[in-house]
Image (spheres, rainbow, N blue to C red):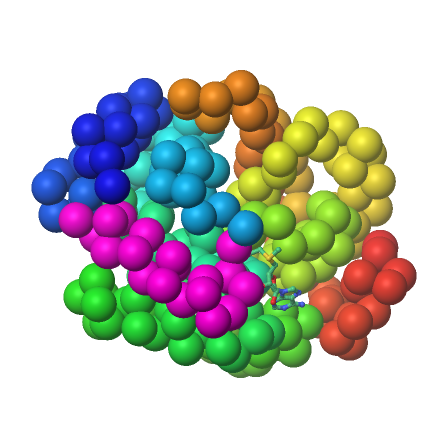
Amino acid sequence: MDDRFLADTFDQIGISLTNDQIHMFDTYYDMIVEKNKVMNLTKITDYHEAVIKHFVDSCSLVLLDDDIYIKKRFTDGASVIDVGTGAGFPGIPLKIIFPQIRLTLLDSVNKKLDFLRDVSSELGFTDINIIHGRAEDISHQKGIRESFDFCVSRAVGNLAVLSEYCLPFVKKNGFFISYKSERADDELKQSAHAFSELRGKLIQEAFFDLPESDISRTLLLIMKTGNTPKIYPRKAGTPSKNPL
Ligand code: SAM
């Protein structure tokens, strides 16, 4: 563990970590490495790499142009759903940095969610809502559909598919933030129909390099402009087999 490196790397995206937050990231890292011995959570287990590619990357939405607005919404307790959270990215790092958010973690693999239940309890978070299921089924549920201020998702699918998973969760005038590892120009072109069907509008495409590396990332900020028609998402499996 290298707490100086952790704090310095977060500093480079304008986040100054408290000692408590450093301790939480270290605990989370230890738990990932331990659990990774018995189940496949992540390929990244080197500490420095995990800090850059998991922890800082997850919090990189503070680099969006609307950062002041987003930070204010987050510190005011916005509701945020992380779709296809896996080992908790980007949801858990965002909760460490913005403990006020009302966070929901969704994944279709319950074993990963058992891990996240342990992480939540170890980090002292009593208000994280953990849901097991497929996005296509869960977003049709009353009380969940179009109830979130933000939906975030990283490494779950291409943009057209992901939009069908994510936009139905978002309230009108809320945002879907998609974390992409590369430039998303082609995916954006292919998603024009999906955006118009699902009522999404691209507000910003942000490119940046992760600190302490030459790894590029793209963040897409997509606004929900109206209610998604009830036929979306289509039945589980259809969005990925036959993207809009
Ligand atoms: N977001 C994490 C990250 O960035 O490390 C995990 C990415 S992992 C490659 C994709 C995750 O999405 C897996 O945990 C998988 O179970 C979940 N997933 C894929 N399709 C899903 C769906 N339709 N509904 C819910 N979860 C899904």
Residue 223 point in image, percent of width and height: 57, 43
- Residue 40 placement, left or right of 116: right
Which residue shows up at 51% across the image and 61% down it? 41
Residue 212 point in image, percent of width and height: 41, 21
Residue 162 point in image, percent of width and height: 68, 54
Residue 198 point in image, percent of width and height: 72, 55
- Residue 156 vertical position relative to residue 128 in the rendered view, above or below: above
- Residue 4 vertical position relative to residue 242 in the rendered view, above or below: above
Which residue shows up at 64% across the image and 54% down it? 156
Which residue shows up at 18% across the image and 66% down it? 124
Q: For residue 191, which quarter of the picture?
A: top right
Q: Which quarter of the frame holds ligand 1? A: bottom right
Q: Which residues are magenta?
A: 23-42
Looking at the image, the residue that sits furthest to the front is 37
Q: Main secondary structure of the magenta part?
A: helix
- Residue 84 placement, left or right of 48: right
